[in-house]
């Protein structure tokens, strides 16, 4: 294997080395403004090498599998000026079995992908011919090979399938964008269901209704939870914890959220969008409880931040990226949540997410797709509305969580996870 050859070459001068190689083939079709825009295939190879020389770290990368000498020499040179190594590479370990490869995706060709996209667009156009419809179908097959100087040697074959549909409805100065998509590692996708959900977003949003400014109950859809999860993700990042920037740095084992909230990072979900057995540093994945009945249980560490903090890495890779987030279902039906609110807001998407001071939980965002709740019913879409609050305060002020849960993944998703609808007691809503 190429990664083994790279390790053998690097160890002539390095004290430790790891290499990871990605080989990937992608086929994708994209529709825009009611017509096919592109149908393309591509291949990609990426090799990343990390070495430790005299206690310092050097890294390099290449897209050429024949560039063994070059990628090794560049990493060794970089180590002369590299940062101090605060970690040891992981030993070889047994891996959890995971379902990440669906052979049914292999025979899927672009003509069938085009048909799928066209079918979804036709459904949207049949609902409202004024919608400028779009769709996308993406199939990726890739192999990951990892090796290091301590004998760890892993390979994994993955498939990915991303399907989405939506469009734009232009009426005068008002432009409404809506869509729905799914991303997973298996072929079984219901394109009619995807188009139907996109249509439902249009149906709910076509009537524009006013809303008054003030503090009111807010229901976050599974996708809309990103407004709260963004701050949480930054705060549990081991690098921010180690640097003292996280407001949760001294909160392990303490209550930080409503007792109904249990959040787990699960890399072993069958065919999940981010399912895998090991990360890009050769650390085996594991199920990581993040919040258990409102209590903070873990931070997320890569090799470097774990070494600096004197803890073990959590298997989330060099970027400390969360895998499949799973929130336990609540005990309130979604329709009941709506019925219990005389005046409130349902939020689904945002513009300007990340404004404010997200690591401290503060957010002030434009609601891109949100709906007014009046007397227990969704009355229509709101425009020119801002939502503001603090994510950590909101997590403590959960009023209800739905029994229903939905997967958030695919081309329209900021994160991957199985999420309920979550109602927060009160947040600040500002209407222009």
Image (cartoon, helix red, strand yellow):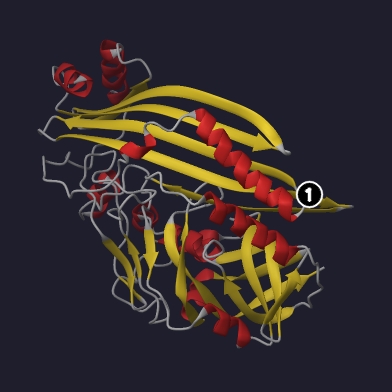
Estimate how packed mark 1 is, as few (under 14), some (14 to 19) or many (20 or more) residues with alpha carbons within 10 Å. Answer: few
SS class, disc 1: loop
Vertical comparison of 83 with 255: above or below:
above
Residue 385, percent from left and from top = 75, 66
The residue that mark 1 highlights is 129
Q: Residue furthest right?
A: 172
Is residue 136 among what the camera can see? no
- In percent of the image, x 31 and y 44: which residue is there? 317
Q: Nearer the viewer, residue 249 or 373?
A: 373
User: The C terminus lies in which quarter of the figure?
Assistant: bottom right
Vertical comparison of 353 with 95: above or below:
below
Residue 281 quadrant:
top left
Q: Nearer the viewer, residue 164 or 211?
A: 164
- In percent of the image, x 17 and y 16: which residue is there? 9
- In percent of the image, x 57 and y 37: which residue is there? 115
Relative placement, left or right, of 232 versus 147 is right
Relative placement, left or right, of 248 versus 313 is right
Q: Nearer the viewer, residue 344 or 430?
A: 344
Is residue 357 among what the camera can see? yes
């Amino acid at each position: 294997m190429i990664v083994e050859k790279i390790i053998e070459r690097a160890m002539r001068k390095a004290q430790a080395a790891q290499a990871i190689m990605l080989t990937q083939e992608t086929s994708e079709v994209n529709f825009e403004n009611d017509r096919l825009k592109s149908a393309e295939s591509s291949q990609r190879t990426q090799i990343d090498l990390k070495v430790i020389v005299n206690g310092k770290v050097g890294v390099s990368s290449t897209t050429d599998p024949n560039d063994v000498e070059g990628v090794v020499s560049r990493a060794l040179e970089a180590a002369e000026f590299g940062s101090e190594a605060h970690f040891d590479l992981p030993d070889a370990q047994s891996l959890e079995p995971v379902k990440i490869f669906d052979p049914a995706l292999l025979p899927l060709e672009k003509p069938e992908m085009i048909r799928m996209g066209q079918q979804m667009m036709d459904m949207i156009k049949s609902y409202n011919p004024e919608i400028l419809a779009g769709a996308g179908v993406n199939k990726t097959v890739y192999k990951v090979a990892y090796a290091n100087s301590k004998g760890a040697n892993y390979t994994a074959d993955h498939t990915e399938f991303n399907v989405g549909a939506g469009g734009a409805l232009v009426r005068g100065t008002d432009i409404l964008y809506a869509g729905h998509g799914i991303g997973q590692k298996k072929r079984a996708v219901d394109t009619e269901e995807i188009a139907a959900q996109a249509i439902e977003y249009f149906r709910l949003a076509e009537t524009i209704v006013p809303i008054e400014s003030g503090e009111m109950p807010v229901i976050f859809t599974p996708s809309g939870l990103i407004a709260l999860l963004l701050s949480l993700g930054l705060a549990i990042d081991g690098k921010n914890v180690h640097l003292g920037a996280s407001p949760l740095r001294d909160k392990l084992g303490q209550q930080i959220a409503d007792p109904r909230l249990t959040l787990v990072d699960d890399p072993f979900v069958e065919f999940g969008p981010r399912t895998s057995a090991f990360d890009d540093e050769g650390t085996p994945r594991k199920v990581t409880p993040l919040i258990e009945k409102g209590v903070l249980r873990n931070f997320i560490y890569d090799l470097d931040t774990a070494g600096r903090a004197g803890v073990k890495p959590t298997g989330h890779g060099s970027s400390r990226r969360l895998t499949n987030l799973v929130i336990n279902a609540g005990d309130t039906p979604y329709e009941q949540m709506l019925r219990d609110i005389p005046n409130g807001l349902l939020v689904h998407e945002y513009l300007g997410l990340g404004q404010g001071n997200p690591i401290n939980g503060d957010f002030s965002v434009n609601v891109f797709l949100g709906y007014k709740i009046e007397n227990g019913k969704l009355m229509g879409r709101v425009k020119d509305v801002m939502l503001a609050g603090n994510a950590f305060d909101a997590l403590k002020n959960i009023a209800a969580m739905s029994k229903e849960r939905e997967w958030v993944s695919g081309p329209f998703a900021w994160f991957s996870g199985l999420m309920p609808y979550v109602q927060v007691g009160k947040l600040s809503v500002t209407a222009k």
